[in-house]
Image (cartoon, rainbow, N blue to C red):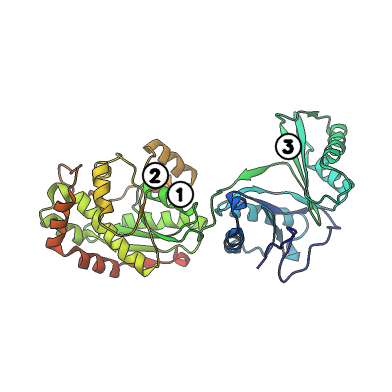
Amino acid sequence: MPFRGSNGGWHTRGMSQSPDPGGPDEPCVLLKLGEIVLKGRNRQQFERILQANIHNAVRGTGIPVDLRQREGVILLRVADGEQRGEPGWTRAAGQIAERVRDVPGIARVCQPLRVAKTPAAVTAAAVALTKGRTGTFAIRARRRDKRFALTSGQLGVLIGREIQEAHGLGVNLSRPDTEVFIEVDTDEVFVFTEGVTAVGGLPVGMSGRGVVLMSGGIDSPVAAYRMMRRGLRCFFLHFSGMPLTGPESIYKAYALVRGLDRFQGGSRLFVVPFGKAQQALASSGADRLLIVAQRRLMLKTGEVLARRLSATALITGDSLGQVSSQTLANITALDDATKLPILRPLIGWDKAEIMAEARRIRTLAISELPDQDCCTLLTPRRVETRARIDDLHRLEGRLDVADLADTLAANAQEYRQENL
């Protein structure tokens, strides 16, 4: 496993240091870290978890990768000699870059050319990368290795002059059409013209584990993504209306978890048939309290499952005031149902914001597919917006809800990542 040495240089356990590239310029992937670089004494723990997550993510591409790290940067190189050289290098690097964009903890993904540590090699790469560009350009040079013969300013002047002579582009340092980035490191120089924004946030697994109450709707997948981005490993719990409904909602939950799995890997979905429990609640005289009582039972079931999975929080897609069950009084009544904290990352979001985020993470189209949601079954004509906790306790006492939650959790059917 790669690690960062105390002197801040590149280090990799079990492999030799990379020599100056002597052949053709090598396409590779350069990852810029976000808030991890702001961490203090436990920063190396964040970095180790991120490195493991990157390895797990890239493994799915089938491309062997060498990983090296220094302050705020991770370098990924294609390790397979058969893929070295154009076009294999470029294609493999592109596949790697596309995959790691979805790994939380990475702020930006760049695809530079890794070139020999000489002014001539750097200049030639910059001129080649700007061929066919129009408008203006600027050089953004950074010299991490102060032993390099030219300063950042001198390097910028040299490369800028060559690009002007080769392509006739104008210089605009404040708002250029093209930016050429030069990063001088210990063993090599990286030259690139752009990068793409990645997920950012913290590495999954750094913040513990949580159980997401995953409906087939728009909100809960977005809530799960927001918590994964904060370093929480998420398990998914779906309540279907079976046997009162068909399996359509299960298919949707399955598809949603499979899509979200690219952010964390190893996802596990648990499905609970909830129809008979809903009938029991309706027959107990819940009336206007039925929706809140159902949600409390879901949370209690989630708490039982969380204990089994060593998870320490529940996550929901609640947004304050969005529906009748999400008034402040009803949210307070839901919090009373469990001793675990209930995380609500969307509590202050409106529907338009949630839909925009769902579209961005590519879950919206799945969530909008038709299905029969268990929460719409047996819905009373009027829903209580100010549920009283004492009334809910009396209702639950008639049904021995704690035992019912244990039974529901025990009957959960699990779908593991390899089946997603």
Disc 1 packing (10 Å; few <14; some 14–19; many ≥20) = some
At 33% from the left and 66% from the top, the residue drawn is: 305
Measured in 3D between alpha carbons, the distance from the residue under mark 1 to the one under mark 2, in whole angstroms, is 8 Å
Left or right: residue 44 versus residue 223 is: right
Q: Which of the two discs, 1 and 3, sits closer to the camera?
A: 1
Q: Amino acid at mark 3?
A: Glu
Q: Which residue is mark 2?
A: 346
- Could you tell which of marks 1 and 2 lies nearer the N-terminus? 1
Residue 290 percent coordinates (x, y): 17, 51
Q: Nearer the viewer, residue 268 or 186?
A: 186
Residue 50 percent coordinates (x, y): 58, 59
Q: How many marks?
A: 3
Q: Nearer the viewer, residue 165 or 227?
A: 227
- Could you tell which of marks 2 and 3 lies nearer the N-terminus? 3
Q: Secondary structure at mark 1?
A: helix
Q: Which residue is mark 1?
A: 226
In this view, 381 is above or below 256: above
Mark identifier at residue 174? none
In this view, 155 is above or below 12: above
Measured in 3D between alpha carbons, the distance from the residue under mark 1 to the one under mark 3, in whole angstroms, is 31 Å
Tell me where residue 53 sits by quadrant: bottom right
- Could you tell which of marks 1 and 3 lies nearer the N-terminus? 3
Q: Amino acid at mark 1?
A: Arg
Q: Which residue is mark 3?
A: 179
Residue 157 percent coordinates (x, y): 85, 36
Disc 1 to disc 2: CB gap under 8 Å: yes
Left or right: residue 247 versus residue 143 is: left
